[in-house]
Amino acid sequence: MNYDVAHALASGALLYATYWLMQLTGVLDGKSKGRQRLTLAVAFAVVILLLNLVWPTA
């Protein structure tokens, strides 16, 4: 199993930063729980997609 630990740590840091910035800017304020989760899921997917385009692990 070839698993890149640095890539996993970078992924975690980027996801945490994304969540923190969305909370800080108020993007999630005033939305229902379902809408918040959907917004976060889309944001996380975009961030991970961009990371994997820039830094593929294969």
Image (cartoon, rainbow, N blue to C red):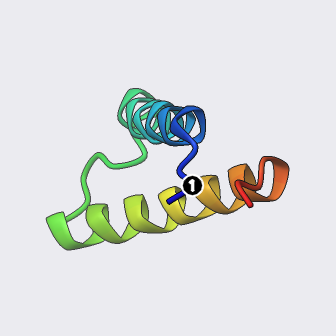
Residue 49 is left or right of residue 10, and the answer is right
Q: Amino acid at mark 1?
A: Asn
Q: Residue at x 16, y 64 (%)?
A: 33
Q: Residue at x 56, y 33 (%)?
A: 10
- Count residues near mark 1 (Cα–Cα under 10 Å), then give few for <14, some for 14-19, many for 20+: few
Residue 56 is left or right of residue 2, and the answer is right
Residue 31 is left or right of residue 6, and the answer is left
- Name the residue furthest left: 33
Q: Is 10 located above or below residue 11 in the figure?
A: above
How many numbered discs sit on the rendered protein?
Answer: 1
Question: Residue 31 placed where, x, y %?
Answer: 25, 60
Q: Quadrant of residue 12?
A: top left
Question: Residue 42 placed where, x, y %?
Answer: 50, 68
Question: Residue 27 placed where, x, y %?
Answer: 43, 46
Q: Residue at x 76, y 55 (%)?
A: 56
Q: On the image, numbered disc 1 is attached to which residue?
A: 2
Q: Residue at x 41, y 66 (%)?
A: 41
| Secondary element at tag 1 | loop
Question: Residue 22 placed where, x, y %?
Answer: 44, 39
